[in-house]
Image (spheres, rainbow, N blue to C red):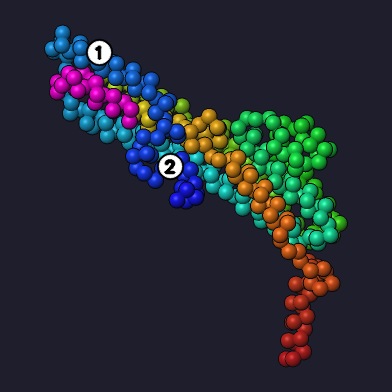
Amino acid sequence: MTENKKTINQYEYPNFIESALAIHGSVTPRVWKKVLAASGYACFISLLSIFIPSLSLPISPFEYAGVIMGLILVFRVNAGYDRWWEARKLWGTVVNCSRNLAIILTSYIESSDSEEIDKSLSLIAAMPYLMKNTLRGFTSTDEVKHLLGNNTYAQLQQWQHKPNFISSKLAEVLAQMQINGKLNQFSFLKAEELRETILDCQGACERILKTPMPFVMAIKSRRFILLFLMILPVALVNYSVYISPMIVTLVAYALFSLDQIGVELQNPFSIDNLSHLPLNDICNTIENNLMEIKNNLSHLPPNDIYNTNENSLGESIIANETIELEQA
């Protein structure tokens, strides 16, 4: 059960009551002050209504206003979730491209060229760590120090956009292997395509990071919440002076929570936000997978057994066509 829970969500309890009362990962600690202020305001209106009996409003308009406000907040949450989910898909692409790139390099390069393979896989493994730190605004490179040589690590410190440096360095290594005949044309082009895709994912994540939700949407939704919670206690005093603060507290908690959830989902990379993407785990997974591929994947037999010449397929087709013509 523990292993299954970790696979699904390490913070989501199987028991409904435990999940409902959980504090870790909840927005409650971030909205309780606003909820308390709304409750205090409702208590003030209830006390004021005792001295001013005419202080009341009909409740029916709030029924329609509540529906409209719910739709606005749901739209805000959905917009935030779309950003979160897009970021997760992009990092899934990074995982897949890193694995495929490692498989290409370990399969189509002879095992005797282990130095080139190790250098390439180290660069691929370092890329996600630097992508993560760039998205989180961190400048530290300690996580990749064990993956890079001293010269490469020293050059890395001089670059402001460090994923660009690693991608450029990997492109140089791939080009050199292709020039030296260690990587055929087809494998080189496919490896380049995967390298470009990883860097494209970094650019797409930066687009999410640097394009916040429209500020006008936040202003209107929060202004609506404020007006609703200021007028609602006046309408509830007709029913019960004592129950009104309790109802306002529950309504305020729901509204403020939905608004805060939309805020938390806007930036899926920041560790300060709730439910941020587990980028540390993803980076560690990529590195472990790449090292496993390097250590366990069998290499192709030498060229004298399997012809790896990029023109071999075309030559075979021409030979087959010649035989068919002779038979005809």
Residue 113 visible, this angle? yes
Q: Nearer the viewer, residue 59 or 323?
A: 59
Query: Along the horizontal axis of the image, is 149 left or right of 144?
Result: right
Is residue 237 within the magenta segment?
Answer: yes
Query: Along the horizontal axis of the image, is 279 left or right of 185?
Result: left
Q: Earlier in the sequence, mark 1 or mark 2?
A: 2
Mark 1 vs 2: CB contact within 8 A: no
What residue lies at 69% left-to-right and 43% top-to-bottom?
127
Q: Nearer the viewer, residue 313 or 163?
A: 163
Q: Position of residue 262 (x, y in %)?
A: 43, 33
What residue lies at 65% left-to-right and 34% top-to-bottom?
134
Query: What is the CA distance from the residue labelled 1 to the residue labelled 2?
Result: 38 Å
Badge 2: how crowded within 10 Å, few (<14), some, or many (20+)?
some
What residue lies at 33% left-to-right and 30% top-to-bottom?
254
Dot 2 amino acid type: Glu
Q: Position of residue 224 (x, y in %)?
A: 33, 25
Q: Quadrant of the C terminus?
A: bottom right
Dot 1 amino acid type: Phe
Mark 1 or mark 2, whichever is nearer to me: 2
- State the extent of the magenta-drawn residues as a range: 233-254
Which residue was labeled with disc 1?
44
Q: Nearer the viewer, residue 111 or 161?
A: 111
**Residue 12 is drawn in which quadrant?**
top left
Task: Count how many numbered circles sit on residues in the image.
Answer: 2
Badge 1: how crowded within 10 Å, few (<14), some, or many (20+)?
few
**Residue 73 is drawn in which quadrant?**
top left
Is residue 249 within the magenta segment?
Answer: yes
Which secondary structure class fits the magenta region best?
Answer: helix
Q: Position of residue 268 (x, y in %)?
A: 52, 36
Which of the numbered marks, if any, corresponds to residue 12? 2
Mark 1: secondary structure: helix
